[in-house]
Amino acid sequence: MPVRPALIPCLSYKDAPAAIAFLCDAFGFGRHAVYADDKDPDFIHHAQLVRDGQMVMLSSFARDSDYMKKANILHPQDAGGNTQSIYVVIDDVDGHATTARAAGARIILDPADQDYDGRVYSAFDTEGYAWSFGNYDPWAE
């Protein structure tokens, strides 16, 4: 039974439609809901993508929104790097890395075994967010 996550990463993209396509093609997410602007379909107000019962939410980067200003949310390109990364538990690390690379992901760490168990690789998405995919499951016995 998939767990309904209580913590959901939220990201903002300068080209949200391209990011949605990339996250689905390269990282194996599926579109759960995508709410585009009625007048500008390239502006995504809110999107929910799922993979194995887990969700990530995203939107178009709108620095002038009240929340973005008050929370001081910066895009990785504007911040000069990431302040967080996302880890996704998967079964086939090497196969996933091959699919991601073929879809244009920039692999920053090739698949490798970890000292603490498991195998992991890391990649940037289209706008520089850092993602890691591994078979280490911190909830497993």
Image (cartoon, grey):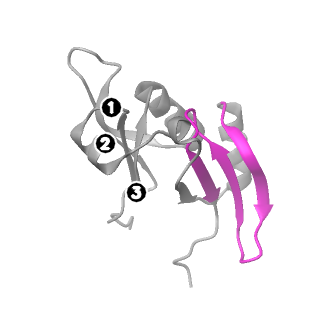
Helix, strand or loop at mark 3: loop
Quick one: label 2 or label 3, which is nearer the N terminus?
3
Q: Which quadrant of the view contains residue 114?
A: bottom right
Nearer to us: label 2 or label 3 = 2
Q: To which residue does mark 1 refer?
A: 62
Q: Would you say residue 108 sits in the magenta stretch?
A: yes
Q: Position of residue 62 (x, y in %)?
A: 33, 31
Residue at the spot 67% in from the left edge and 51% down from the top edge: 122
CA separation in Å, label 2 and label 1: 7 Å
Helix, strand or loop at mark 1: loop
Residue nearest the observer in this picture, 137 or 80? 80
Badge 1 crowding class, 10 Å Cα cut-off, few under 14, some 14 to 19, many 20 or more, is: some
Above or below, 66 against 140 in this view is above
Q: Give the range drawn in magenta.
A: 104-133
Q: To which residue does mark 2 refer?
A: 68
Nearer to us: label 1 or label 3 = 1
1 and 3 marks in contact (CB < 8 Å): no
Q: To which residue does mark 3 refer?
A: 53
Q: Indicate the amino acid at tag 1.
A: Ala
The disc placed on residue 33 is none
Q: Indicate the amino acid at tag 2.
A: Met
CA separation in Å, label 1 and label 3: 28 Å
- Total labels: the figure holds 3
Helix, strand or loop at mark 2: helix
Above or below, 7 against 140 in this view is above
Quick one: label 1 or label 3, which is nearer the N terminus?
3
Residue at the spot 25% in from the left edge and 35% down from the top edge: 65
Q: Position of residue 140 (x, y in %)?
A: 55, 79
